[in-house]
Amino acid sequence: EGKYFVTVCAHERACLFGDIASGQLTLNEYGRIVGEEWLRTAIIRARITLGEYIVMPNHIHGIIVLRESTTPASHAESDVIAGPRPGSLGAIVGGFKAAACSRINLLRGTPGFPTWQRDFHDHIIRNDDEYRRIVAYIRNNPLRWAEDSLCQTNNGSPVA
């Protein structure tokens, strides 16, 4: 349970999802798929709410609010599973990444090709002031794109 600021980067930080010019973000079809799958995350998972989010040319920032599960957890040793525990932040982000990747690869005819970097970054949002700062950061991200550490082309040079 809690509020999390999540960042998921495209594979090799490639600008797959759109472009930014003069502070204006334009998403392509892949970027629109990423946005649709992000929003679908809350529709198919009853225990989460989504806060502010933005799809950038090579990453997505978003806020995920996890509510306490009403299903009792089982702690038997026989319940050991591979991968993240169902309902965890890792499982939620993993499901989002898989759904978006599947749709993008279908569209571009590249089954099995990676769309995302292996992991994701998360930060626990501890209070309302921090929440407001993160919302402002997300909203202003396109305006600061040239200074963003994730603003790269495939060769590592900044995007103009």
Image (tube, rainbow, N blue to C red):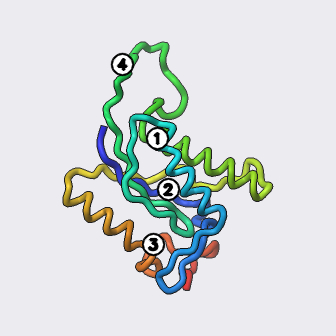
Discs 4/2, front:
4
| Circles 1, 4 touching at the beta carbon (< 8 Å) | no
Real-space CA distance between mark 1 and mark 4, rounded to the nearest whole angstrom: 19 Å
Discs 2/3, front:
2
Q: Residues within 10 Å of mark 1 (few under 14, many from 20)?
A: some
Real-space CA distance between mark 4 and mark 2, rounded to the nearest whole angstrom: 30 Å
Up-down relation of residue 40 to residue 117 (above or below): above
Badge 3 is on which residue? 149
Q: Residues within 10 Å of mark 3 (few under 14, many from 20)?
A: few
Badge 1 is on which residue? 90
What is the three-letter code of the residue carrying label 3? Answer: Ser
Real-space CA distance between mark 2 and mark 3, rounded to the nearest whole angstrom: 13 Å
Up-down relation of residue 151 to residue 77 (above or below): below
Which one is earlier in the sequence, the residue at label 4 or at label 3? Answer: 4
Badge 2 is on which residue? 8
- The residue lying furthest to the front in this view is 43
Badge 4 is on which residue? 72
What is the three-letter code of the residue carrying label 2? Answer: Val
Q: Where is residue 69 in the image (x, y as percent from the top left)?
A: 35, 28
Discs 1/4, front:
4
Secondary structure of the residue carrying numbered label 3: loop
Q: Position of residue 102 (x, y in %)?
A: 68, 47
